[in-house]
Image (tube, helix red, strand yellow):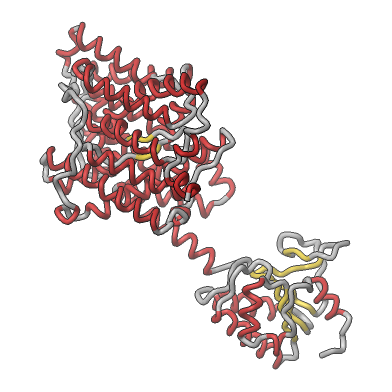
Amino acid sequence: MNERWSRIFPPARWLPTYQAAWLRFDIIAGVTLAAYAVPVAMAYATLAGVPPVNGIYGYLLGGLAYAVFGSSRQLAIGPTSAISLLVATTVAGMAGGDPERWAQIAALTALVLAAVAVLAWLLRLSSLVAFISETVLLGFKAGAALTIAMTQLPKLFGVPGGGEHFFARVWTLVGQLGQTNVTVLTFGLVAIALLLAGEKWLPGRPAALVVVVLAIVAMTFTSLAQSGFATVGELPRGLPVIERPPLRFHDVDGVVTLAAACFLLAYIEGVSAARTLAAGHGETIDPRQELLALGAANFAAAMGHAYPVAGGLSQSAVNDKAGARTPLALVVASVTLGLCLLFLTGLLRNLPTVVLASIVLVAVKGLIKVKDLKELWRVSRFEFTIAVAAVVGVLLLGILRGVLLAAIISMLMMIRRVAAPYVAVLGRIPGARRFSDMERHPDNEAVPGVLVVRVEASVLYFNTEHVREQLDARIAAAAGLRAVVWDLSSAPYVDTSAARMIADLQQELAKRGVVLRLVEARARVRDLLRDMGLEEHVGRIGRFASVDDVVRELEAQPAAR
């Protein structure tokens, strides 16, 4: 019971071993994370279409909840760029242009996401997200980055922008370039340059906060404010009011689909970031516990009028590099953000929105992994094509359908690989008693009259036809064939349809005077094949004989046919 409690409530594990020397590091990391979070949260909230302060609420409340339930010691929870855009593009059609309803739907999405995450935790579904391949995510993130960039570039140029999808936004922006506000553009480019310099020369430091402070000072004490700058305006002072979103999920068509897509993105992004940080410290995380932590963080965010939150690598890297030792750093960050909301909101009134756009543009550049795409092109043109398809899907269909397309592509990739497994012809490794693929190793020695094959996957009802076709082709190409040896070591599972196919194959081979032997089957596979009566026709299906043993036996019986 204690072990189960400590698994559900991770502080029960790290609090008893907390060292006093860590407190200084956690405090510094928490304050640093809060300094990073204020401008970034406001930028992402603006991207999501909700009031800027709602982004800060997400960091404050989501971080507190994750500190209680999260299994990572360094992960930081808050709004992310991809989820922000997903919320923006989807909620736009649900809110009918009403800003208040927009914010309510965004909060409701976080609440439904929390329910989905907790349900997934209860059903132990943490492994399901593994079906989304890294290849598809690589393309999806690149497409999301380009889409996000196109929502922010009009702010950088000081033009209205417009358009529902990527290419419409590009066309609209090109048509408005003649209206560019050169002062706003110059200001934004300077902000971007400072942010990039901060990334390079001050990694892990809140460079965005410095840029925000400089921008506010410039707007307050110079005449730049009269040059057409849009500003954040007055933020509401005080802590968020804790209450349930006024809407219910059946009040908004499509909110469940949106929440499911946000859940998929949030969990994959959060677990990936948590694993990366844990590996750097020689630690591990609990993927299932992360589902509960994600649910708790989004429940807290929803109750405070925020929108869906997740663990992101950028904010987590800030937390880690600032020296965070435990999730107590998130508590410190939340307390710091609470103090800012109580006493410092008035200072943000003159913050130009072009600076928030600059922060988003710099943040999303890391989503486009050009090096990884080049590597994919080099090692696998097929997977590169899949990544490009994910990019195009996001650009053409929008980010919500892009998420669903990414999931479908991943499933199709998996089905394709399992439905059409490779069937290898094996030969003896020269000077050894082992066999390997002759296509990869042409110097292997073929066994006269004996065909040795291996299917590189489980043999199941949906791939038996393909496997049989491949086997028939290899049998037809074999000259003077008197025996077929099937190495089952690479087949973790064989179902009844496959067993019937093997029985049919044995009968057809027997009519031609060819022997079929099954070798190195795994325990459950052996049990199934025996129960199906195959041992009566192919000989003993044991666990001791190797491919070489059976081949030598057949070689020693040239006249046994």
| Quadrant position of residue 161 | top left
Indicate the position of residue 298 as horizontal and vertical percent values. Answer: 30, 42
Front in this rendered view, residue 33 or 336: 336
Is residue 169 toward the left or the right of residue 495 in the image?
left
Residue 327 image point, x, y percent: 43, 32
Residue 512: image x %, image y %?
72, 91
The relative height of residue 237 versus residue 225 in the rendered view (above or below) is: below
Q: How many marks?
A: 0
- Quarter of image, res 213: top left
Q: Is residue 40 left or right of residue 318?
A: left
* Residue at 18% from the left image edge and 40% from the top image edge: 243
- Residue at the far front in the pictured view: 1
Q: Residue 364 location, x and y as percent?
A: 38, 33
Q: Residue furthest top?
A: 221
Q: Residue at x 27, y 14 (%)?
A: 215
Q: Is residue 2 above or below residue 273?
A: below
Residue at (44%, 35%) from the top-left corner?
75
Residue for point 78% across, 84% down: 482
